[in-house]
Amino acid sequence: MKTDKAIWYVSFAMRNPDAGHHRFARQTRTFTTEQDAKAFARTLLVQTQDVSAGTINPHIPRRVIAPAAITAWAGDS
């Protein structure tokens, strides 16, 4: 049985209100398509602006989407 390999990741930090002033739990989810990664990133942008994404090595071309560019990237269809 062949399974699809994850190519994209979305990484995000969610503030834990019970953990104090500077504590953030960073998490990463992986996706097989860029469209799935974008859809997930759009849902996260409602909760936090600390979202980044990109391709997982060794996938080429290598892409990294920084938090400053994530809104424009996730808005593309």
Image (cartoon, helix red, strand yellow):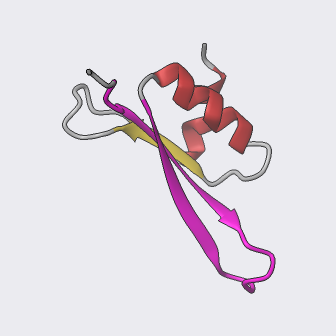
Please state which of residues 30 and 77 is positioned toward the viewer in this rendering.
30
Left or right: 50 with respect to 45? left
Q: Position of residue 25 (x, y in %)?
A: 59, 69
Q: Position of residue 9 (x, y in %)?
A: 44, 41
User: Which residues, given as a range, are shown in magenta?
Assistant: 4-31
Outermost residue toward the left?
A: 58
For residue 1, what is the image quadrant?
A: top left
Outermost residue toward the bottom?
A: 20
For residue 45, what is the image quadrant?
A: top right
Q: How many numbered marks, from 0 up?
A: 0
- In the rendered structure, does residue 21 fall within the stretch colored magenta? yes
**Point 31% across, 25% down: residue:** 3
**Point 65% across, 79% down: residue:** 23
**Point 69% across, 33% down: residue:** 42
Please state which of residues 21 and 14 is positioned toward the viewer in this rendering.
14
**Point 54% across, 20% down: residue:** 35
Q: Position of residue 32 (x, y in %)?
A: 41, 26
Q: Position of residue 41 (x, y in %)?
A: 62, 37
